[in-house]
Image (spheres, rainbow, N blue to C red):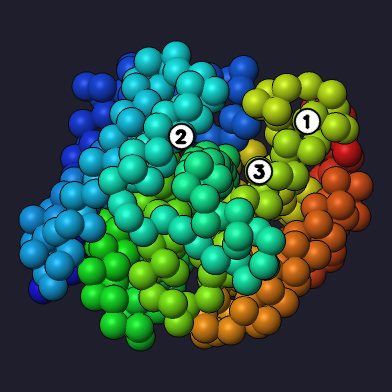
Amino acid sequence: MSWLVVFIAATVVTGLIVVSQKLHVAFSGDNDPSKPQQVHVGSTPRVGGLAIWVGVLTAYLLTGRYKGAQALWDMLLLCSLPVVLAGFVEDITKRISAGKRLVAAFASAALFWLWSDQHTMQLGIPGIDWLLAFAPISFFAFVIAIAGATHAFNLIDGFNGLASGFAVLVAGSMALVAYQVGDLPIMAVSASLGLATLGFLVWNFPLGKIFLGDGGAYFLGFMLAELAVMLVIRNPGVSTYYAFLVVLYPVVETLVSIWRRKVHRGVAAGQPDALHLHQLIYWRLVRFGLFDCRPTTKVLRNSATAPYLWVLSLICMVPATLYWYSTPALVIAGILFVLTYLSLYKRLLRWRRPAFLVIRGEPAARKAEVKADPSIEG
């Protein structure tokens, strides 16, 4: 029953934000046409993370004392405050740079490391494991990994349902694995986080009535990264590579973006562009097929992008959930995902679309689009 209450609370609060948007959209909306990532229609509230927060706090009140879950809730929620507040302030003011938000992510990760006595992961690599046994090195590696994964999650928040749908998949996987190994606190927190996010998703996908925002994306990224690490550390039977595999998609997206900007284009790593995989899928596959430019079609075209990445992430998610105990299986799945990602990215960048991925192809559409907007030419 408590799980249903969490879902309802997040759904209702998200709906209240949507129906009251005339009162706050002037400062909570996002309608800057100068952004290279801008693909939505009109000014839309980007404070959906608040609704997820309410859902999670509802879960905290209902399941906080559920077989030792309160200590885990306290640690996660309090340590997340620096990065979540930085994200929410950016959503409202639009003045918190990506660098400052990354520093806030470092602060949250550092707080968690100092609070928890469970933060040393073993990779099964003798020299690396020996180094990680030293506290300063463990601290540095932990903070970099958690902050990087948190920031990476925000990077994939570009289309209706993309980041939030991925979060539901990750939370569901961790809840199932935690249940199998008997870690009921992590199961309770993961399930609550997934259901709260699902309540937001009802309004976000496919009609895009509200966006996750930086506050919501950073909150989900931090919570999921910490839960994945703690699931591995608290349960030796779970392979360390499970934690890497469930968040591999946003991490690979971030690493490719850094390489593209720093090495290939020679600009700052934080310089925004419109060449993420989800954006290439939108321009090369979805927008190419659904050429109707009416506002309603634009919204649906935006939402049609996310399922591509949900399916792609299943290359990681399914093996991680089924073979959480097997390092070889997880490593193979990780390699398969990276190769698939890079192959698809390279093909789309060069306008070599796999025909079966185009929803509805119209050969003349691409020429018309390029003529109207030459910037989308590969």
Q: Nearer the viewer, mark 1 or mark 2?
A: 2
Q: Which amino acid does label 3 sit on?
A: Thr
The residue closer to the viewer here, 67 or 194, is 67
Callout 1: 10 Å neighbours few (<14), some, many (20+)? Answer: some
Q: Which of marks 3 and 2 is in front?
A: 2
- The numbered disc on residue 98 is none
Quadrant holding the C terminus: top right
Label 1–label 2 contact, CB within 8 A: no
- Please provide percent x and percent y for residue 213: 41, 35
Dot 3 or dot 2, earlier in sequence: 2
Horizontal side of 7 relative to 335 (left or right) equals left
Q: Is residue 80 visible to the viewer in this orientation of the structure?
A: no
Q: How far apart are marks 3 and 2 (CA)?
A: 16 Å
Instruction: In the rendered view, tell whether residue 328 sits above or below residue 82.
Output: below
Image quarter for residue 357?
A: bottom right
Label 2 residue SS? helix
Residue found 21% across the figure and 31% down from its top: 20
The residue closer to the viewer here, 150 or 275, is 150
Q: Mark 2 points at which residue?
A: 106
Q: Name the residue under label 1.
A: 261
